[in-house]
């Protein structure tokens, strides 16, 4: 009997394996990926919401710039320490974009998104236990004079560029893993610096859903779910128009370069 090729073994790992020891190995690898996504979303939400909440309550100690740069730095760190494990999506819009781009198997999308949402909710609950209901737990909402439709369009536009940045760097072998952290983190900081005061520059449904669920106010949540998801669609369409079919490098970046 012919031995399975490396490509077949990789696909078996991504799909959870076939049976017996191979299947167990696949499940073990996938559980590590899901734990990485949960932990990454927890850290990102904790820093993003914590910084926003403390800025609202004590702006002299935590400036607006610090509140928006902190989560960008956290994303940079997360990509460095766990990008090779799960791809460091930590954002349902990014997972959707990778799947639409055919860099990530659709069968794994629900697990990744569930892990990201769980991590965000746990972070918001931890923040509420730690600080109490300060600063609305750093939740995102449009500025009072910004209509909901404009806020939706802005979040979609911000996420479009985020997805372009992630997919664009992921498609280049030289930007795999740690090197991808620099452009992605830089863009998140840039987006927050100019648009943070308008919508919070969430670009991440999990980051916004977490504090909204914990504090029990979902009045603006739809903006931060629909906007980033629309932005993911637009970002993938632009990436396809600019670069054509997906690359092997993109799949490695999306699934964790050590395991894809």
Image: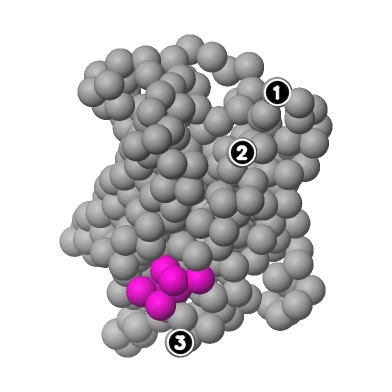
The image quadrant where one finds the N terminus is bottom left
Precedes in sequence: disc 2 or disc 3: 3
Q: Position of residue 150 (x, y in %)?
A: 80, 36
The majority secondary structure of the magenta stretch comes to helix
SS of the residue at dot 3? helix
Which picture quadrant has residue 129? top left
Q: How is the image coloured?
A: one colour
Residue stretch rendered in magenta on the structure: 177-184
Task: Between label 1 and label 3, give the one nearer the viewer.
Answer: 1
Q: Is residue 183 magenta?
A: yes
Q: Which residue is mark 2?
A: 197
In-image side of 209 versus 162 (left or right) = left
Q: Is residue 202 magenta?
A: no
Task: Between label 2 and label 3, give the one nearer the viewer.
Answer: 2
Using a 10 Å C-alpha cutoff, classify the residue at mark 3 as few (fewer than 14 neighbours), some (14 to 19) or many (20 or more).
Answer: few
SS of the residue at dot 1? loop
Which picture quadrant has residue 20? bottom left
Question: Distance from label 1 to label 2 (Cα)?
Answer: 10 Å
Using a 10 Å C-alpha cutoff, classify the residue at mark 2 as few (fewer than 14 neighbours), some (14 to 19) or many (20 or more).
Answer: some
| Residue beneath the point at 36% across and 84% down | 5
Image disc number at residue 144: 1
| Residue beneath the point at 26% across and 59% down | 29
Image disc number at residue 19: none
Rendered position, 46 above or below 240:
above
| Residue beneath the point at 73% across and 72% down | 240
Q: Which residue is mark 3?
A: 174
SS of the residue at dot 2? helix
Precedes in sequence: disc 1 or disc 2: 1
């Amino acid at each position: 009997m012919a031995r399975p090729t490396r490509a077949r073994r990789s696909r078996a790992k991504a799909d959870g394996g076939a049976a017996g020891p191979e299947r167990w190995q696949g499940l073990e690898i996938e559980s590590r990926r899901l734990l990485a996504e949960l932990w990454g979303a927890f850290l990102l939400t904790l820093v993003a919401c914590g910084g926003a909440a403390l800025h609202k309550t004590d702006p002299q100690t935590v400036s607006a710039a610090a509140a928006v740069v902190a989560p960008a730095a956290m994303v940079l760190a997360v990509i460095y320490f766990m990008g090779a494990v799960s791809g460091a999506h930590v954002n349902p819009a990014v997972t959707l974009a990778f799947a639409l781009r055919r860099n990530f198997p659709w069968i794994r999308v629900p697990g990744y998104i569930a892990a990201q949402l769980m991590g965000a909710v746990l972070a918001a609950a931890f923040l509420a236990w730690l600080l109490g209901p300060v600063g609305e737990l750093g939740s995102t909402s449009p500025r009072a004079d910004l209509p909901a439709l404009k806020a939706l369009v802005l979040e979609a536009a911000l996420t479009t560029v985020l997805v372009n940045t992630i997919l664009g760097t992921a498609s280049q072998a030289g930007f795999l893993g740690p090197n991808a952290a620099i452009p992605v983190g830089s863009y998140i900081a840039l987006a927050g610096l100019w648009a943070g005061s308008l919508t919070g520059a969430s670009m991440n449904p999990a980051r916004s859903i977490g504090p909204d669920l914990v504090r029990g106010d979902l009045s603006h949540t739809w903006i931060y779910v629909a906007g980033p998801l629309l932005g993911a669609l637009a970002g993938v369409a632009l990436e396809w128009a600019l670069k054509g079919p997906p690359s092997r490098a993109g799949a490695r970046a999306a699934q964790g370069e050590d395991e894809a």
